[in-house]
Image (cartoon, rainbow, N blue to C red):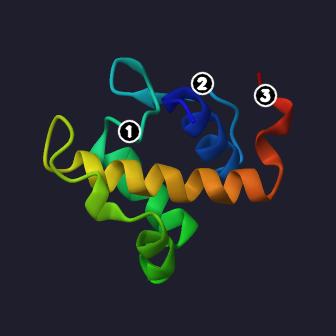
Amino acid sequence: MTDRELLILAAAAEGHPYPWVLPERGGERPWNPLQDDGDALRLAVRRGLFFKPDFFHFLSLERFVGQNRDDCHATRRAIVRAAAAIGGATGAGDSHD
């Protein structure tokens, strides 16, 4: 699954279309929990992912560690993958391109 597909399903789990633009001081910024720690943490908290460790076990967080750009990348990707699984399970992402 591509990063875009993951973001579409994760946004759907949040009840938003993707791309999702957030208001920010002096303008707007794109929502991207694959790159932004804050977006990833808010996604995990709203979806209750920290209270369901089976999601993280299922996603084998360890296999992402050391593969990518920074220490938090694996955690952000696991959060987005778990949220995408929720979005996909509900069929919420079906109406997006």
Q: Secondary structure at mark 2?
A: loop
The reply, left or right, for residue 31 in relation to residue 85 is: left
Which class describes the residues within 10 Å of circle 2: few (<14), some (14-19), or many (20+)?
A: some
Amino acid of disc 3:
His
Q: Earlier in the sequence, mark 3 or mark 1?
A: 1
Give the residue drawn at x 56%, y 39%. 6
- Give how far across and how far down residue 5 sits, in percent: 61, 32
Give the residue drawn at x 53%, y 59%. 82
Which class describes the residues within 10 Å of circle 1: few (<14), some (14-19), or many (20+)?
A: many
Distance between the Cα atoms at labels 1 and 2?
13 Å
The reply, left or right, for residue 89 in relation to residue 18 is: right
Mark 3 in CB contact with mark 2 (< 8 angstroms): no
Q: Secondary structure at mark 1?
A: loop
Give the residue drawn at x 38%, y 65%. 60
Q: Nearer the viewer, mark 3 or mark 2?
A: 3
Instruction: Give the residue pinned by disc 1.
Output: 34
Give the residue drawn at x 21%, y 53%. 65
Q: Earlier in the sequence, mark 1 or mark 2?
A: 2
For this rendering, which residue is in front, 21 or 69? 69
Instruction: Give the residue pinned by disc 2.
Output: 19
Q: Quadrant of residue 95?
A: top right
Instruction: Give the residue pinned by disc 3.
Output: 96
Q: Nearer the viewer, mark 1 or mark 2?
A: 1
